[in-house]
């Protein structure tokens, strides 16, 4: 790999996005977020991080955790992230995130953190391990964004509250210490942002679902993908159309639209006079075919550990150099003694 230049093109806005290394991405992760990251690389200065420090708020087997982090990195590249065009790195490789997080913690109100819905949800899910990291990780998330002065953050509906907190922290810091941080905005794709469970289309698709048929993993083979779609929950109607009360079909049409580029009217016309069975098969085949290049590229990348290490080491170095400028400025703003 050629030596990369950490300098940011000032004519382009900066996008930051992070993803936890908690196993293979779901189709929902892919269509709702990751698939859209690749095309952004030509339009924006993109910084993508595997946020392994966030993942540590839940107990994990260290060996499995380390393996999943490497696999997650390979998956991101397989999904179209180019380490030459973007900064792609592992969060724990850049200590500037954690250092800025402490500064920002002192600009965050206790009451703001108590209102975080994900803290409440995860506390109920893991009542035996309600740790301090689980409570304060939204501040680390703010640091992830602000340490690069990101303009935009691709988010799903469930992350709006965290981004709003990051915005509030940035504004409060700027008011207290003078203009410093860019106040980030959300980047929300127009389609595919809310892919639902195949077995309960009122809920988000999740790899933690007890029913294995509810979730498509992007490394599932073609037969598995088609089988899961054939078992997808629909309704008693037989007409393929997007309408209120047809959550299952609406979800399948959204997925089909994302992988084919067809709009809802085109899909309804294509399957006019055909039943749900034909439609489910078509969706399964379209999804499997669209994911085939990802599976092929991932198999090649995961077999080349030396190349992956070269990529994430280079990414970490570029991320450190870029973020260190902003951290140094923030440290001076709050009154820390400069020793460099």
Image (tube, helix red, strand yellow):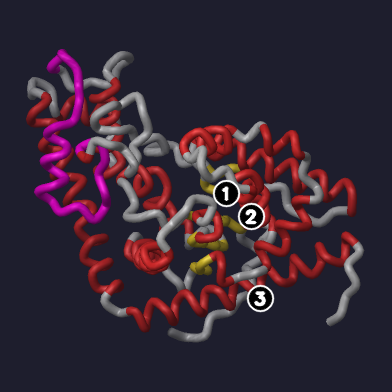
Residue 153, label in figure = 1
Instruction: Point out which mark residue 106 bears.
Output: none
Along the polypeptide, which appears first: circle 2 or circle 1?
2
Along the viewing direction, whichever of 200 and 88 lies nearer the viewer: 200
Residue at the disc numbered 2: 145
Return the x and y of residue 47 as percentages of the image width and height: 55, 62
Can residue 65 be seen here? The reply is yes
> Where in the figure is residue 110, as x and y percent of width and height?
75, 39
Q: Is residue 275 above or below residue 6?
A: above
* 192 to the left or right of 16: left
Asked if the stretch drawn in magenta spans residue 336, the answer is: no
Q: Position of residue 329 (x, y in %)?
A: 81, 66
Classed neighbour count for the residue bearing mark 1: other residues with Cα under 10 Å, few (<14), some (14–19), many (≥20): many
Query: Circle 1 — which element?
Result: strand
* Count of marks overlaid on the render: 3
Q: Nearer the viewer, residue 264 or 186?
A: 186
Tell me whether circle 1 and circle 3 mark residues in contact (CB < 8 Å): no
Q: Quadrant of the C terminus?
A: bottom right
Tag 3 or tag 2, which sits nearer the N-term?
2
According to the image, label 3 marks what residue?
321
Crowding near the residue tagged with mark 2, few <14, some 14–19, many ≥20 C-alpha atoms within 10 Å: many
Of tags 2 and 1, the one toward the viewer is: 2
* C-alpha separation, residue under disc 1 versus residue under disc 3: 21 Å
Compared to residue 198, the image places residue 135 above or below, namely below
Q: Is residue 66 left or right of residue 137?
A: left
Say whether disc 1 or disc 3 marks the residue closer to the N-terminus. Answer: 1
The reply to whether the magenta stretch includes residue 227 is yes
- Dots 2 and 1: beta carbons under 8 Å? yes
Q: Bounds of the magenta span?
A: 213-238
């Amino acid at each position: 790999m050629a030596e990369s230049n950490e300098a940011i093109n000032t004519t382009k806005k900066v996008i930051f996005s992070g993803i936890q290394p908690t196993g293979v991405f779901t189709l929902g992760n892919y269509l709702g977020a990751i698939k859209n990251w690749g095309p952004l690389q030509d339009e924006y200065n993109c910084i993508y991080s595997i946020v392994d420090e966030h993942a540590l708020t839940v107990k994990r087997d260290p060996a499995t955790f380390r393996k999943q982090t490497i696999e997650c990195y390979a998956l991101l590249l397989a999904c179209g992230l180019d380490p030459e065009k973007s900064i792609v790195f592992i969060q724990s490789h850049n200590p500037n995130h954690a250092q800025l997080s402490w500064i920002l913690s002192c600009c965050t109100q206790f009451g703001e953190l108590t209102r975080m819905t994900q803290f409440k949800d995860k506390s109920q899910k893991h009542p035996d391990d309600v740790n301090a990291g689980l409570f304060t990780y939204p501040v680390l998330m703010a640091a992830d964004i602000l340490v690069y002065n990101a303009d935009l953050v691709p988010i799903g509906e469930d992350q709006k509250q965290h981004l709003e907190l990051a915005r509030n922290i940035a504004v409060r810091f700027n008011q207290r210490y003078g203009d410093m941080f860019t106040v980030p905005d959300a980047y929300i794709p127009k389609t595919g942002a809310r892919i639902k469970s195949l077995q309960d289309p009122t809920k988000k698709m999740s790899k933690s679902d007890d029913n294995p048929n509810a979730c498509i993993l992007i490394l599932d083979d073609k037969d598995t993908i088609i089988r899961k779609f054939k078992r997808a929950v629909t309704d008693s109607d037989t007409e393929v159309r997007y309408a209120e009360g047809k959550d299952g079909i609406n979800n399948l049409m959204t997925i089909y639209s994302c992988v084919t580029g067809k709009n809802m009217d085109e899909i309804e016309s294509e399957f006019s006079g055909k039943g749900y069975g034909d439609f489910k098969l078509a969706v399964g085949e379209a999804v499997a075919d669209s994911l085939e290049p990802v599976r092929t590229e991932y198999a090649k990348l995961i077999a080349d550990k030396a190349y992956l290490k070269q990529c994430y080491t280079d990414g970490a170095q570029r991320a450190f150099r870029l973020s260190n400028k902003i951290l140094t400025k923030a440290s001076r703003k709050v009154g820390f003694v400069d020793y460099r």
